[in-house]
Each structure stands twice: as structure tokens, then as C-alpha cells.
Image (cartoon, grey):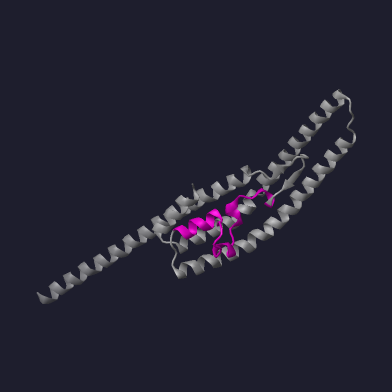
């Protein structure tokens, strides 16, 4: 009887341990799935910001000046920015808002360092290409202006040509950004995925909610 009772207890304990392990596994898998879904949402959100961020600003002389290749602020997060007390990058601000532990903060800095190195290489190539496009636009505009006259009809025709030139430039920039958006999204997705493993469930939910505002 004693052996039978012990066997039953052992069997019950084994079942409970198996059930607990299975529950934890399912919970972890569910959390990973939710994290992956959220990562995809955040990556798509940043990609749309990139496509919709103006790459040029008009001055009084109507020339264009490219700024950071039209990158949204979240793409410009850096490890050094994590330590600044000045107005932080939105991504950095959201990370700080979830109250990281010292260990988490160290891991976040490492992730940001890797991300920054990758994004800087991509940004350099994009800036160079966009600068060439801008130079062509400015040269074409100067050529049009050099033919300007005081005749009203000529001035009106010139304005139409300049407007058309701007539209062509903006269309070319948009096409360029659409083509290169996946290239920028790749390191950003890797960063978001890494952050999803560093933050706990509560922190991740708070961080992703903050970043989605």
C-alpha cells in the first residue's frame, strides 16, 4: 500500500511538472508571437514615417536642402543619445519611460550600438544618392532661371516649368525612398526584435504603446 501511495504521488507530481512546463512553454510561445506581431507593426509604422517624411525644405530662394535623407527620428536613435539629458529621440524616450534595470540598460546600449553602425552605412549611401538628385534639380532650375525675361508671358511659362521640375524631383525622391525602404527596415526590425527579448512583457507593451503614439 505504501509503495502504491508513493507511486501515485510520484505520478501526480510528474504530471504537474509536465503541465507546468507545457504551460510555461505555451506562454513563452504566445509572448514571442505577440512580440513578433508588434515588431512587424512598429517596423511598418517607421517605414511609413520614412516614406512620408519630407526630404526637402523650401527656402526663400525656393532651393531645396536635404535633411538626414528624410529619415524619421526613430531611425536616428543612437547609443550616445541614450545617455543624454537633452530632449531625447522618441525611441530613446520610450525606452527610458519603461524604467530599465542596469542590466537591461547595458544590453539596450549594445543593441543600439550595433543598430547605429548598420544604419550609418545605409544613410551614407542614401545621402550621397539624394545629394546627386538634388544637385541635378538645382542645376536644372538655375538653367531655367538664366533664361528668365521681364516679359509677363515668359515669366508665367517659367513658373510652370519650375513647378513641373519640383514635382519631377519630388516624384524621383519618392521612388528612391520606396525602393530603399526595405533596406532601412531590416536593421530597424533587428533592433526591435532584440529589444523585445531584453524587455519583459510589461515593459515591451508599454514601450510599443509609447512608440505607436
Residue at 32 percent across and 62 percent down: it is 22
Q: Nearer the viewer, residue 33 or 127?
A: 127
- Prevailing secondary structure of the magenta residues: helix
Q: Is residue 33 visible?
A: no
Q: Determine the image quadrant of residue 111.
A: bottom right
Q: Is residue 148 above or below residue 129?
A: above
Q: Nearer the viewer, residue 182 or 73?
A: 73
Q: Is residue 85 magenta?
A: yes
Q: Residue furthest top?
A: 153
The image quadrant where one finds the N terminus is bottom left
Residue at 63 percent across and 44 percent down: it is 53
Q: Which residues are magenta?
A: 68-97
- The location of residue 157, given as percent across then percent down, is 83, 27
Q: Is residue 161 above or below residue 48?
A: above
Q: Nearer the viewer, residue 163 or 46?
A: 163
Q: Is residue 122 left or right of residue 83?
A: right
- The location of residue 76, given as percent across then percent down, is 61, 56
Q: Is residue 63 left or right of residue 33?
A: right
Q: Is residue 91 left or right of residue 50?
A: left
Q: Is residue 28 visible?
A: yes
Residue at 77 percent across and 50 percent down: it is 131
- The location of residue 56, given as percent across then percent down, is 70, 44
Amino acid at each position: 500500500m505504501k509503495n502504491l501511495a508513493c507511486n501515485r504521488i510520484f505520478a501526480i507530481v510528474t504530471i504537474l511538472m509536465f503541465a507546468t512546463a507545457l504551460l510555461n512553454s505555451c506562454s513563452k510561445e504566445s509572448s514571442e508571437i505577440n512580440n513578433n506581431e508588434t515588431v512587424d507593426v512598429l517596423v511598418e509604422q517607421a517605414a511609413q514615417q520614412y516614406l512620408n517624411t519630407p526630404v526637402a525644405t523650401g527656402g526663400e530662394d525656393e532651393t531645396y536642402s536635404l535633411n538626414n535623407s528624410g529619415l524619421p527620428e526613430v531611425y536616428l536613435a543612437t547609443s550616445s543619445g541614450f545617455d543624454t539629458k537633452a530632449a531625447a529621440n522618441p525611441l530613446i524616450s520610450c525606452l527610458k519611460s519603461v524604467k530599465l534595470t542596469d542590466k537591461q540598460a547595458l544590453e539596450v546600449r549594445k543593441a543600439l550600438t550595433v543598430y547605429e553602425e548598420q544604419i550609418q552605412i545605409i544613410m551614407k549611401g542614401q545621402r550621397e544618392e539624394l545629394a546627386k538628385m538634388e544637385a541635378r534639380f538645382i542645376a536644372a532650375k538655375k538653367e531655367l532661371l538664366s533664361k528668365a525675361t521681364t516679359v509677363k508671358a515668359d515669366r508665367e511659362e517659367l513658373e510652370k516649368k519650375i513647378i513641373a521640375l519640383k514635382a519631377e524631383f519630388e516624384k524621383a525622391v519618392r521612388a528612391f525612398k520606396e525602393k530603399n525602404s526595405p533596406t532601412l527596415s531590416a536593421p530597424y526590425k533587428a533592433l526591435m526584435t532584440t529589444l523585445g527579448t531584453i524587455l519583459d512583457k510589461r515593459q515591451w507593451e508599454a514601450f510599443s504603446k509609447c512608440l505607436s503614439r
